[in-house]
């Protein structure tokens, strides 16, 4: 009964708050040891709000791009030192990165970062809520799906698994991680604690004495997760290789994902999100490198770059994939912004990634090439990207349950 199990487990997790961990939790450490050996890890990042993919991965070789965006297009790459900070960073002669994504350019050049363009959900909705739900459930157009693609993608394991096998950095468990497999959500590692010793004792007694096996299991999973995370939290963490995470929730989330992975506690999947991408008004400032979108991209790029540096050779076992619910209109609106669109771009970063390339078929931006006459058309289903990572990176060959009713096509990303 996955739905009931999810409810019971999360009721137990809801009892975890800020405070000091009681001594009895130390007893769980022996039972909560991480499985031996390195595992392949998938980190998913959601850009909530519908990022403007055309100003993130700039089609500077497309004339129509500049016709459609007379005031917010990112200028073509240049060697002029006085204009370089505001121009696209060339990738392959046709595409370029927004200048605020400078920290990611070396990773692309070194073959560690791949980009998939004209990608997204085939469902035509322009509702943020529905589009995010479809992408996180992995079933576009189907609202009845109860669990998420990440939960279904966890490979079946024999014997005991880590209580933090799947972890999300945030106040609630995201849609993509909900389901029958254990997963936990936390805002911070240090905040995932039982408030005081007396409360801990009462919770332990309540769950241990329960007649319901699901309730006993939920309590055990929760207490083991708390104990394991407290063991990590007691060791002060310093990012490696001079990695400097940007201030703010997203940078903090990626730093803690790195801490969990390097703590060898058995993480196989991690999730973080970054909001603020719904730029209907004043997407850019007076210069292409200033304003709402550039500032957000700077935080995003610096955080991903810091994560790469911090992880070092551990990135050989890690792949990071980014996504957003849909893109923006090809034509700018009357407020120097963009409205809800269709296809977008996805980034895939990792040691095993065949990077240095923009994947996907470019559909063009001429009027007759646009989706519904207004948006970048979709040529790659987002499930093709995720499906390849589940199969070839995580090593889970059972894609049919992960993406029911759809057979992902391999792009050759990993």
Image (spheres, rainbow, N blue to C red):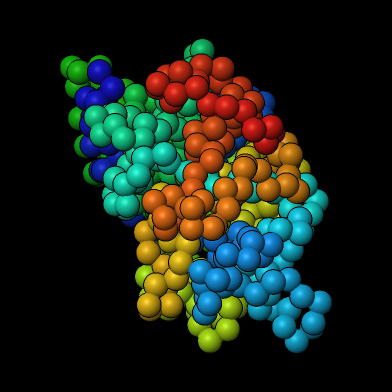
In the displayed structure, 241 sits above or below 314; it is below
Is residue 51 visible in the rendered image? The answer is no
Q: Position of residue 71 (x, y in %)?
A: 52, 79
Frontmost residue, 414 versus 140: 140
Q: Position of residue 176 (x, y in %)?
A: 39, 37
In the displayed structure, 284 sits above or below 45; it is below
Q: Is residue 244 left or right of residue 326?
A: right
In the rendered image, which quarter contains the C terminus?
top right
Q: Position of residue 24 (x, y in %)?
A: 37, 36
Frontmost residue, 225 versus 308: 308
Residue ID at (41%, 55%): 373
In the displayed structure, 207 sits above or below 175; it is above
Frontmost residue, 200 versus 106: 106
Q: Is residue 87 left or right of residue 251?
A: right
Frontmost residue, 10 versus 271: 271
Is residue 288 visible in the rendered image? The answer is yes
Q: Position of residue 304 (x, y in %)?
A: 61, 56
Residue ID at (56%, 20%): 396
Q: Is residue 294 left or right of residue 206?
A: right
Q: Is residue 358 left or right of residue 232?
A: right
Residue 265 lies in quadrant: top right
Residue ID at (56%, 17%): 397
Residue ID at (54%, 57%): 365
Direction top: furthest residue: 158
The mark tally for this picture is 0
In the rendered image, which quarter contains the N terminus?
top left
In the displayed structure, 176 sits above or below 57; it is above
């Amino acid at each position: 009964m996955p739905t009931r199990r999810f409810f019971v487990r999360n009721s137990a997790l809801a009892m975890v708050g800020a405070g000091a961990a009681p001594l009895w939790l130390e007893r769980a450490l022996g039972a909560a040891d991480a499985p031996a050996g390195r595992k392949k890890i998938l980190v998913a990042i959601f850009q909530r709000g519908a990022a403007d993919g055309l100003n993130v991965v700039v089609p500077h070789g497309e004339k129509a791009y500049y016709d459609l965006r007379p005031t917010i297009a990112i200028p073509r790459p240049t060697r002029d030192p006085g204009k370089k900070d505001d121009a696209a960073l060339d990738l392959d002669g046709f595409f370029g990165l927004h200048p605020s994504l400078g920290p990611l350019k070396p990773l692309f050049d070194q073959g560690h970062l791949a980009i998939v363009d004209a990608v997204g959900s085939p469902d035509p909705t322009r509702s943020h809520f529905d589009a995010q739900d479809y992408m996180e459930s992995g079933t576009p157009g189907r609202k009845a799906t109860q669990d998420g693609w990440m939960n279904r993608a966890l490979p079946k394991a024999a014997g005991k698994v880590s209580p933090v096998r799947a972890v999300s950095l945030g106040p609630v468990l995201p849609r993509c991680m909900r389901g029958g497999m254990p997963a936990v959500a936390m805002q911070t590692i240090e905040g995932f604690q039982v408030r005081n010793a007396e409360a801990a004792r009462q919770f332990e007694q309540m769950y241990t004495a329960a007649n319901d096996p699901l309730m006993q299991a939920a309590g055990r999973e929760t207490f083991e997760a708390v104990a394991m995370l407290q063991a990590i939290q007691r060791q002060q963490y310093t990012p490696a290789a001079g990695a400097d995470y940007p201030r703010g929730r997203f940078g903090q989330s990626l730093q803690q994902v790195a801490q969990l992975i390097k703590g060898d506690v058995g993480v196989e999947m991690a999730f973080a999100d970054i909001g603020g991408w719904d730029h209907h008004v004043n997407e850019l400032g007076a210069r292409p490198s200033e304003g709402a979108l550039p500032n957000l991209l700077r935080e995003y790029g610096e955080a991903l770059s810091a994560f790469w540096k911090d992880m070092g050779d551990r990135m050989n076992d890690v792949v990071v994939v980014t996504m957003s619910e849909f893109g923006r209109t090809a034509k700018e609106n009357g407020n120097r912004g963009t409205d809800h669109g269709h296809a977008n771009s996805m980034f895939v970063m990792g040691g095993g990634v065949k990077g240095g390339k923009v994947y996907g078929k470019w559909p063009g931006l001429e009027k007759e090439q646009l989706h519904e006459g207004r948006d970048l058309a979709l040529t790659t289903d987002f499930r093709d990207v995720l499906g390849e990572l589940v199969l070839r990176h995580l090593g889970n060959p059972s894609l049919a349950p992960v993406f029911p009713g759809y057979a992902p096509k391999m792009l050759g990303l990993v």
